[in-house]
């Protein structure tokens, strides 16, 4: 099969910088599988944090969105969501379509929306300096929480303000910490001179 016909990597910093001497198709498959495994593990491991424990899922979603490229990023998160939708226990508390339709399912849907936006921002260079990377990370985080809060308010029949108290306020410090980690990590991984 001619690999030039199948270009899954499409602007993936990771494929270009770390797998450039290998098959692009194989490199892409490795990244997708690694991404879904890490998303699953990150859903299961809670890091002690105040006021509530946090998982590293949003950190991984933001990282994938800014480094996997326009094709691999959405494919990775879509595969993760598909695995959960068919009942594989990849989400924090199990799997299944019911989980996606439940109070916290909007955050998971937000993962896909965020990586689509972030991979586009990455493609136009918004991961090439600290200021634009920060804006990209904030856009991704706001996207995830907007989708999550919308579904949380609908499913629990709460106002957006009440939903923010439940599904945003406890996570502000943790999300800020994750953004700071990624501000250091993204430039290192992308091997770009960041100003």
Image: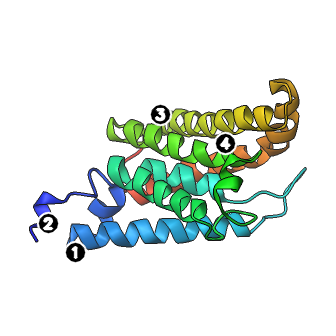
Q: Position of residue 51 (x, y in %)?
A: 90, 50
**Which circle's residue, 3 or 1, is located before the other in the chain?**
1
Image marks 1 and 4: residues in contact by CB distance under 8 Å? no
Q: Nearer the viewer, mark 2 or mark 1?
A: 2
Looking at the rendering, which quadrant does residue 190 occupy?
bottom left
Residue under pointer 2? 3
Q: Nearer the viewer, mark 3 or mark 1?
A: 1
Give the Cα distance between marks 2 and 1: 11 Å
Foreground pick, 65 / 112:
112
Image marks 2 and 1: residues in contact by CB distance under 8 Å? no
Q: Is residue 195 shown to the viewer in this render?
A: no
Give the Cα distance between marks 2 and 4: 36 Å
Q: Classify mark 3: helix, strand or loop.
A: helix
Q: Quadrant of the C terminus?
A: top left
Give the Cα distance between marks 4 and 3: 26 Å
Give the Cα distance between marks 1 and 4: 37 Å
Residue under pointer 4? 106
Residue under pointer 1? 22
Foreground pick, 150 / 187:
150
Q: Classify mark 2: helix, strand or loop.
A: helix
Give the Cα distance between marks 3 and 2: 33 Å
**Which circle's residue, 4 or 3, is located before the other in the chain?**
4
Image marks 3 and 2: residues in contact by CB distance under 8 Å? no
Q: Is residue 160 above or below residue 63?
A: above
Residue under pointer 3? 132
Q: Is residue 36 shown to the viewer in this render?
A: yes
**Which circle's residue, 2 or 4, is located before the other in the chain?**
2
- Give the residue drawn at x 33%, y 51%: 71
């Amino acid at each position: 099969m001619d690999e030039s016909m199948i270009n899954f990597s499409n602007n993936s910093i990771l494929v270009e910088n770390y797998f450039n001497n290998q098959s692009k198709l194989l490199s892409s498959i490795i990244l997708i599988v690694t991404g879904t495994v890490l998303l699953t593990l990150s859903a299961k491991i809670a890091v002690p944090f105040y006021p509530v424990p946090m998982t590293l899922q949003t950190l991984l979603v933001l990282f994938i969105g800014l480094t996997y490229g326009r094709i691999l990023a959405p494919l990775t998160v879509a595969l993760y969501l598909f695995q959960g939708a068919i009942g594989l226990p990849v989400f924090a508390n199990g799997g299944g379509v019911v989980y996606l339709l439940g109070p916290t399912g909007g955050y998971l849907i937000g993962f896909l929306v965020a990586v689509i936006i972030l991979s586009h921002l990455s493609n136009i260079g918004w991961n090439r300096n600290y200021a634009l990377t920060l804006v990209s990370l904030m856009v991704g985080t706001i996207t995830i929480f907007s989708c999550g809060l919308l579904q949380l308010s609908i499913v629990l029949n709460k106002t957006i303000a009440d939903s923010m108290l439940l599904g945003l306020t406890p996570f502000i410090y943790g999300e800020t910490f994750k953004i700071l980690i990624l501000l250091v990590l993204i430039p290192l991984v992308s091997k770009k001179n960041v100003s």
